[in-house]
Amino acid sequence: QVQLVESGGGLVQAGGSVRLSCAASGNMISIYTMGWYRQAPGKQRELVATATTGGSTDYTDSVKGRFTISRDNAKNAVYLQMNSLKPEDTAVYYCNAAYIVPGYRKDYWGQGTQVTVSS
């Protein structure tokens, strides 16, 4: 199992930047696909970005070119650098670790960190 703790959220003006961190304990994150999800009020949780065990990254269209996910397996941490923030980026951001093998997936979640972007 892995435990995840997010940090770095807060209030930022539109156009600003925030860097979220996710510290993992328990298992090493090297065996997990790591991701960031977000949930805005009244909306479903959505995938923001992923970084696979092989280092490949992917992003939802709305954040491409603005957000960057990175992972440091040695530090057992994953990060989300968010630039050019928009009010619609306001949400609770969750760190996710997914153990994925053929025919099986197990997800672990952090408690979330609030990011509020003011216009």
Image (cartoon, rainbow, N blue to C red):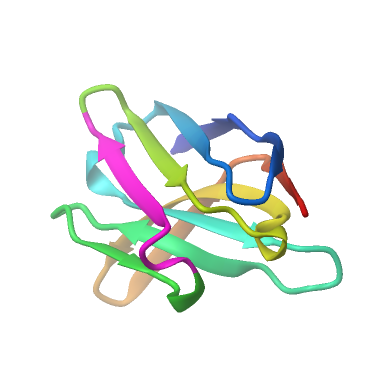
Examine the rendered structure and indicate whether residue 76 appears above or below residue 71. above
Please report the residue visible at 59 percent of the width from the left and 29 percent of the height from the top. 7
**What stretch of residues is rendered in magenta?**
63-73
Q: Quadrant of the N terminus?
A: top left
Q: Across the whole image, how many numbered discs are drawn on residues?
A: 0
Magenta stretch: includes residue 71: yes
Residue 2: give x, y in percent of width and height. 45, 36
Please report the residue visible at 24 percent of the width from the left and 74 percent of the height from the top. 102
Q: Quadrant of residue 16?
A: top right
Q: Nearer the viewer, residue 78 or 102?
A: 78
Q: Quadrant of residue 50?
A: bottom left
Q: Nearer the viewer, residue 18 or 76?
A: 18
Magenta stretch: includes residue 1: no
Q: Nearer the viewer, residue 101 or 69?
A: 69
Examine the rendered structure and indicate whether residue 78 appears above or below residue 91. above
Residue 90: give x, y in percent of width and height. 72, 56
Q: Nearer the viewer, residue 101 or 30?
A: 30
Examine the rendered structure and indicate whether residue 103 appears above or below residue 81. below
Image-based side of 53 in relation to 15, left or right: left
